Amino acid sequence: MFAEEINPDQVASADIVVGIPSYNEAASIAYPTNRASEGLIQYFSDKRGVIVNCDNNSTDGTRDVFLDTPTEVPKIYLSTPPGVKGKGNNFRNLFKKVLELGAESVVVVDADLKSITPQWIRHLGEPLDQDFGFVAPLYVRHKYDGTITNSIAYPMTRAVYGRRVRQPIGGDFGFSGRLTEIYQTSTMWTEAISQFGIDVWMTTLAMNNGIPICQAFMGRPKIHKPKDPGADLGPMFRQVVGTIFEMMIAYAPFWRRVKWSKPTAIYGFGLGEVEMPPPVNVDQGKLYQKMIEGFDDKLDLWRQVFTEEVFHKLGEIMTFSQDRFDFPTHLWAKVLYDMAVAYKKQVTGDNDTLVESLIPLYYGKTLAFVKKTEQMSIQQAEEFIENECMVFEETKPYLIERWPV
Amino acid sequence: MAKKKKILIVDDEEHIRFLYSEELADEGYDVITADSGYQLLEKIENEKPDLIVLDIKMVDYNGLDLLQDIRNKYYDLPVILCTAYDTFKEDMKSIAADHYVIKSFDLTELKNKIATALEAQIPEE
């Protein structure tokens, strides 16, 4: 039976909230709930804490598992109405509840997290007591885990908004009550943001509202459900990338004045030996095949989107065999910048189709990245990504010149 | 006339401080130096440099720990790490720096990174 809110302990106010968004996570939600409770007790015992599950009216018993998980802190269950899904919609519920409770600090963690420890709550929450308003996670991730982050979300948010947040769509964040109010009152909301676009929306709003940002080292890898980068992307790609482009339109007066990028403060060291992430296997043949198939299919649309120079260069790289394939970073940066301009101009009249047309090129870029970093350690691959980001920053004048004023 | 940008060189090797001071002064910067991390935050508070060039491996101080202290107090103050070894990148604390350079007698890369870091700008809102 649907319940919009279940608040067994009648919690009316709190200092710190741990939010766990979910949809059908009965098999996994008990673990992060339990860890969150331990984290609040161990590190925030002087504060009134509460754990809030913001759910999409799950049908697999998530609600009961959450409420039945033994915790030493109170819990509140919230749900979107039947039929309303999406992580963003879950967060909207959470923002409203946080403001009702008057909480000054909020930590959110994914419901499928297997690697969360009580220290994660500390590291995402403690910087908020030190005048930081947004805390992003720093994990050790396998070099092939998070390819949308590595090739799109990180370089784009860094080059466009000027702040180096390595995991802008990490999914585990900390943010202040003040930032919650900004989130709640923002008029910038789309269908994509209500789904998987929510993470990049939250990070971008923090970057564009002068909020001091910190990155907190988690010590352990993010262990959730990583996928082969060549596997089907589902709607997530369109929602994340579409949100990036949508926000560029809203915040153009800001980012056009941003030059280069700056680092953030870092928090959370001294955790002892760092655990290495599990490997992620990549099917390079599948990436190559998907790229080629997409190329044949999207040519006409790309002709409308890309400059002649970029279109011509794409034609060149598509002739490379899998063994010799490469996708130069400056070309990839121009592809994304051209795509952002085309999105703003609505050149095709259907921006969803426009963003999805990027997918074959994303597969190609991922293939090139995998080939280049095959013999590299995780740390060497990180350095490679940092160098790619500098190329995005160096190419930014191209974006500014092409952006319609 | 535009005010000269002030650069603070923090390095426990005298010849490095001398070389960097001479060359960066020739580039038009106002250069001050420190031979250790001792009371570095106080020095920054008093001198108000526009940018810091920070040695990682000093005898008595770990540059990466100093970097954290600087970043926590001076959020956007540009810091360029200098080192003879690139193994420091294995320590994630290093990402709080704006840039890094491997020490060399050719300061072209350092000068370029200083120029970029000083040019970096994020509008207030």
Image (spheres, coloured by chain):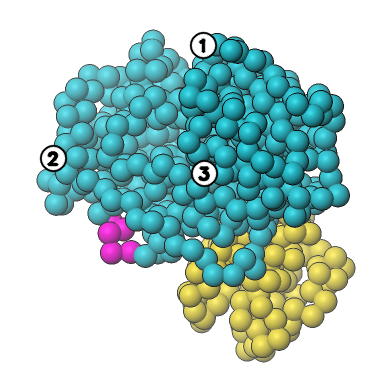
Chain colours: A cyan, B yellow
Q: Chain of mark 2?
A: A
Q: Residues within 10 Å of mark 2 (few under 14, many from 20)?
A: few
Q: Nearer the viewer, residue B88 or A69?
A: A69
Q: Chain of mark 1?
A: A
Q: Are the numbered discs 1 and 3 placed on the same chain, yes or no?
A: yes
Between tags 2 and 1, which lies in front? Answer: 1
The residue wearing badge 3 is A113
For residue A191, above or below residue A227: above
What secondary structure is found at the residue carrying circle 2? loop
Q: CA distance from mark 1 to mark 3?
A: 25 Å
For residue B43, above or below residue A393: below
In which image quadrant can residue B39 be found?
bottom right
Query: What residue do we see at 49% from left, 20% from top?
Result: A59
**Which residues lie in the magenta part?**
A372-376
What is the total number of numbered labels drawn onto the structure image? 3
Q: What amino acid does circle 2 point to?
A: Thr
Q: Chain of mark 3?
A: A
* Residue A83: numbered disc: 1
- Sequence order check, earlier mark of 2 and 3: 3
For residue A94, above or below residue A346: below
Q: What amino acid does circle 1 point to?
A: Gly
* Residue A319: numbered disc: 2
Q: What amino acid does circle 3 point to?
A: Leu
What secondary structure is found at the residue carrying circle 3? loop
